[in-house]
Amino acid sequence: MSRDFDVVVIGGGVIGATMAALLGARRLAGAGRVALITDAAGVPATPGTPAALADDWDLRVFALSRASQRLLRLCGTWQRLPAARLNPYERMCVWDASGSPGGSGSLTFDCAEIGEPNLGFIVEGRALASASLESVGAAGAVRIEGTVQTLRVDENEARIRLEDGRDLTAKLLIAADGVASKSRELLGIETAGHAYHQDALVAHVRTTQPHRNTAWQRFLPTGPLAFLPLPDGRSSIVWSITREQARHLRSLEAGAFAAALETASAAALGGIELTTPVASFPLQLKVAVDYVRQRAVLLGDAGHAVHPLAGQGLNLGLLDCAALADALAPAAGNAELLGEPRLLRSYERWRKSENLLAATALDALERLFSSSNPLIERLRGVGLGAVGRVPVLKRALALRALGLTGDLPAFLSAD
């Protein structure tokens, strides 16, 4: 069976679903003319989350910027998120291992200082993925369960064959199937980067001191440790650590793991109780050499995977969606133009430079804060303290992280 579409999006995660819904929201393709290819498994929990915890917060959470919030609202996703599965946070405190929170070697951001109601939202991954998929159908896109077997693209169309023998054609193919993108491989797009030889450990914990709606992050020589505030008073941890240490920590019983975590956090939030199992995922820097092929384009982690130390991975991918929608605006109402090379190259120039800058900056920060050189340690502490004493610079950094400044599509510039 063969079926024709204007656009086929591969990848049923948040980025793919957001792009499929955005094509409808921006009226770039008509109802029934966009297909989203998803795995038949639906929306999985983070690996390591047992079925018994299905009603609890998933172990994977995201810190979403204001720009991401606006985009998801435009797609109809934000309105579908359960209130119990998101939490606005108001402050962020970052400090070096040699300093202390609130001390001279730390940096604190507060939403009140920039006239904003919050610094963003902590959102549960499973709820976000589910709401994103719901918005796809509401936008008039067609969800197709299946696995891609082959791709062929030329100047006229993209042809997709699924493993069950179904054939799809489209004027534009959008690959949003993650860091291990099969679509990217089938399109012949190479990648550059390196593994960090680190795993990120994730879990939810309860602390004896309240998190005060603050995101806490301590930079350690082995990698950063973050505590993200949840609405029930717990915190979600993201602990980046060497792979060997990660294996050891995951082998510990709950009390021993909590004790190790308390030591690593310098007891910034007091005593710690582990309330979930611990899951992990490997960290790597991977960037696509190209974002575009004839009638095809990469989005999100398929084009760039970065270190999670600043929580920007998903936000960068959502900005990809917004930028692609903006670049495709001249093709609205004309399906033939959706794969026009000049439009896709415009998107590539825009987002490739922004994403490469972000990836390079995050990689440099990871190297800087993991150095055990005494001189560099002192300079780190001085640098964090110096930023805190320059209100204009501090405000600029906060607004940039919120997605309120920078090279943004016009339709994200205001609510």
Image (cartoon, rainbow, N blue to C red):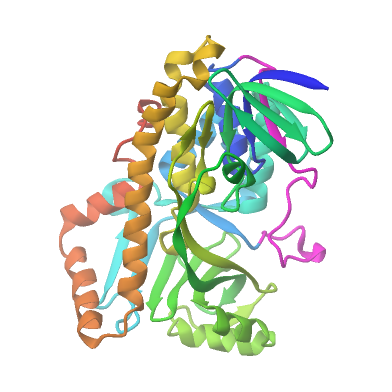
Residue 52 drawn in magenta: yes
Q: Residue at x 34, y 44 (%)?
A: 354
**Dividing the image into 4 quarters, which one contains the N terminus?**
top right
Which quadrant of the structure image shows residue 42? Answer: top right
Q: Position of residue 297 (x, y in %)?
A: 51, 34
Q: Outermost residue toward the top?
A: 333
- The relative height of residue 176 versus residue 170 in the rendered view (above or below) is below
Of residues 281 and 163, the one drawn nearer to the viewer in this rendering: 163
Is residue 271 something that shows in the picture?
A: no
Q: Position of residue 247 (x, y in %)?
A: 62, 82
- The relative height of residue 20 versus residue 244 in the rendered view (above or below) is above
Is residue 262 something that shows in the picture?
A: yes
Q: Residue at x 66, y 16 (%)?
A: 31
Which quadrant of the structure image shows residue 232? Answer: bottom right
Q: Residue at x 36, y 77 (%)?
A: 370
Q: Position of residue 33 (x, y in %)?
A: 66, 18
- The relative height of residue 11 versus residue 259 in the rendered view (above or below) is above
Q: Is residue 396 left or right of residue 311?
A: left
Residue 53 drawn in magenta: yes
Q: Residue at x 29, y 82 (%)?
A: 99
In the image, which residues are magenta?
30-58
Which quadrant of the structure image shows residue 376? Answer: bottom left
